Image: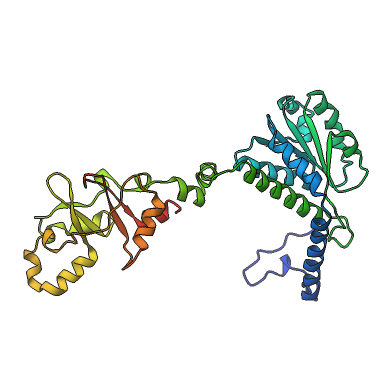
Amino acid sequence: MGSVPHSTSAYDLSFYTNSSSEESSVNPKDLRLFFESQQKYLNYFFQNLDLSQTLTFTQTLLSSKGTIFFSGVGKSGFVSQKISQTLVSLGVRSSFLSPTDALHGDIGILSRSDILVLFSKSGNTEELMKLVPCAKAKGAYLISVTSYQGNLLSAVCDFNVHLPLEREICPFDLAPVTSTAIQMVFGDTVAIALMSAKNLSRDEYAANHPAGRIGKRLIFKVKDVMKKQEELPLCMEDDMIMDQLVELTSKGCGCILVIDDEHHLVGTFTDGDLRRTLKASGEGFFKLTVGQMCNRNPRIIDPEAMAVEAMQKMESPPSPVHFLPVVNHQNVVIGIITLHGLVSAGL
């Protein structure tokens, strides 16, 4: 057993680095060549793809009455999972079926109304070949997506899509890099074609992505992200400004909502208004009420408005603001929405 190295300081990293005096580096010309070669091989795919095959494949998925399952081994398996997840996000019933797990019970999920799409570069993958007769026994419709001509998988499936592959960018033409890029481009492009054919609206798409920024912008309303009840910085218009300094600073809104006895909005008083009042009135500041110095024509918003509309309203001319009072159709204050709150909500 070799000796254990002494503790390594931040300035002694030689144990973890290449001991060779000549360090390896990326040749810029080689890097450029690799990208140019990849572009060439991808162009070969686009130029030689059989669109009639692709149309049949896409229409078959669109007409599916059951679940569209995807399967593959290795890198093709990862691609299959990604394409399935893309379809799910578009509202299409889809799932990944591991060929290994399928042979140990998971194939029970397959039914006669389902489609099973098998991704394989060679089309001769042993695990998929073993899966085919079992899937056929379940009555599923089988589609192979392969790149080698005359492969075994295409001969035993109900339909085959050929993905033209000139070669891998790998110098040995072995590592599955160009082939997986082609599979991904093909699958995701078909997914978008399905999205178009289904006339998926922005609202429907957003409903499938409630945690994403797009979904939040299209789903969240003002009432979903506003402060309310005890969180509101409130005061009456006859209250002295001096007496409301704590309320102005403690609620984290940078303002006070000025209301009357029936909770109607009278105006707003901000920390900016406070600074301007102090500068203009001097000692007279101690005798002023909030109502005397508040803005009686503030921007407001309805609780049913979209949250993104609130953000747009805050940023609109003549000058941006950092909050909006939320009032109902009777001008009763029910909340406040802040720019910080919108940003915190991921909008």
Rendered location of residue 78, percent (x, y): 73, 45
Please tell me which residue is depicted at 82% across the width and 58% down the height of the picture.
47
Please tell me which residue is depicted at 76% across the width and 60% down the height of the picture.
3
Quadrant assignment, res 245: bottom left
Quadrant assignment, res 332: top left
Q: How is the image coloured?
A: rainbow
Please tell me which residue is depicted at 82% across the width and 27% down the height of the picture.
136
Rendered location of residue 347, percent (x, y): 44, 54
Apparent side of residue 314 relative to residue 265 in the rendered image (left or right): right
Rendered location of residue 104, percent (x, y): 77, 27
Instruction: Identify whether 297 is placed above or below 108.
Output: below
Q: Nearer the viewer, residue 330 or 208?
A: 330
Apparent side of residue 31 relative to residue 91 in the rendered image (left or right): right
Q: Nearer the viewer, residue 59 or 12?
A: 59
Apparent side of residue 164 relative to residue 68 in the rendered image (left or right): right
Q: Quadrant of the N terminus?
A: bottom right
**Residue placed farthest to the right in the image?**
150
Does residue 1 show up?
no
Instruction: Identify whether 145 is placed above or below 258.
Output: above
Q: Nearer the viewer, residue 148 or 53?
A: 53
Does residue 114 show up?
yes
Instruction: Identify whether 179 is placed above or below 126.
Output: below
Q: Across the whole image, how many numbered discs are drawn on residues?
A: 0
Rendered location of residue 327, percent (x, y): 26, 48
Quadrant assignment, res 139: top right
